[in-house]
Image: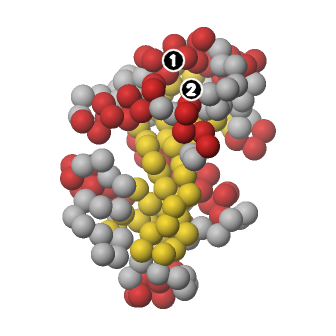
């Protein structure tokens, strides 16, 4: 899987090349006011993350809202063979950490700077593991951390089932004062 020019593929020609390639590659979804090839619009429309409520919500968000979210989040797509295999969307955030966690991370403020994985999903037909998407999201967040203070990766689980998955599979922890199923976090360097 390749990343083009700093990981951002945005021209129509580049998008078409990435979509048509048999080898999956990453591209950044352009803002709504940028001309987008119909093949990408079609690939977004065909994206299907599955039947669980959280998967359906991710599919609907990608098809209907991702383009409009460009001002507040960046959505990365893993594309190839004419389809979107998976995606994630990152935004800036904060997370409340306990005093113990702040000491362990070397973070002074109660609200630590974070990168929020706002959405993440893979297509049911894709031959990838969801961890591939999460690892790429974490790597992107670490690159951003070289230019902007960021300590942790956070998720706001869609539902309790998703919260259990994030905690059990990847080791995410509840934010200080977070209700059951609320914001979860992981040190940025934990996924490497």
Residues 37 and 191: in front is: 37
Indicate the quadrant containing the N terminus: top left, top right, bottom left or bottom right.
top right
In the picture of the structure, the residue carrying the numbered disc 2 is 79
Give the x, y percent position of residue 54: 29, 39
Instruction: Tell me if mark 1 has few (under 14), some (14-19) or many (20+) residues whose alpha carbon lies within 10 angstroms of its own.
Output: some
Q: How many marks?
A: 2
Q: Quick one: SS at disc 1?
A: helix
Q: Residue at x 60, y 11 (%)?
A: 38
Observer able to see residue 80: yes
Image position of 55 (left or right of 143): left
Image position of 181 (left or right of 7): left
Q: Residue at x 57, y 22 (%)?
A: 80
Give the x, y percent position of residue 50: 29, 28
Give the x, y percent position of residue 144: 66, 58
Q: Quick one: SS at disc 2?
A: strand
Report if the CB atoms under discs 1 and 2 are less than 8 Å apart: yes
Residues 127 and 165: in front is: 165
Q: On the image, which quarter does residue 39 sit in?
A: top right
Give the x, y percent position of residue 131: 43, 46
Q: Is residue 110 above or below residue 78?
A: below
Q: Residue at x 47, y 32 (%)?
A: 65
Q: CA distance from mark 1 to mark 2?
A: 9 Å
In the picture of the structure, the residue carrying the numbered disc 1 is 43
Q: Nearer the viewer, mark 1 or mark 2?
A: 1
Residues 112 and 49: in front is: 112
Indicate the quadrant containing the C terminus: top left, top right, bottom left or bottom right.
bottom right
């Amino acid at each position: 899987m390749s990343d083009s020019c700093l990981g951002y593929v945005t021209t129509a020609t580049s998008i078409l090349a990435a979509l048509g390639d048999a080898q999956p590659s990453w591209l950044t979804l352009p803002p709504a006011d940028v001309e987008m090839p119909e093949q990408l619009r079609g690939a977004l429309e065909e994206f299907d993350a599955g039947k669980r409520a959280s998967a359906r919500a991710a599919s609907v968000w990608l098809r209907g809202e991702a383009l409009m979210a460009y001002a507040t989040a960046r959505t990365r797509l893993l594309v190839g063979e004419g389809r979107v295999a998976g995606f994630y969307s990152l935004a800036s955030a904060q997370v409340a950490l306990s005093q113990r966690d702040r000491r362990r991370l070397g973070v002074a403020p109660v609200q630590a700077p974070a990168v929020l994985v706002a959405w993440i999903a893979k297509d049911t037909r894709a031959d990838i593991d969801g961890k591939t998407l999460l690892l790429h999201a974490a790597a992107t967040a670490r690159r951003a951390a070289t230019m902007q203070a960021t300590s942790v990766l956070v998720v706001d689980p869609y539902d309790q089932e998703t919260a259990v998955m994030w905690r059990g599979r990847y080791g995410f922890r509840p934010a200080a004062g977070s209700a059951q199923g609320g914001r979860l976090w992981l040190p940025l360097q934990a996924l490497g």
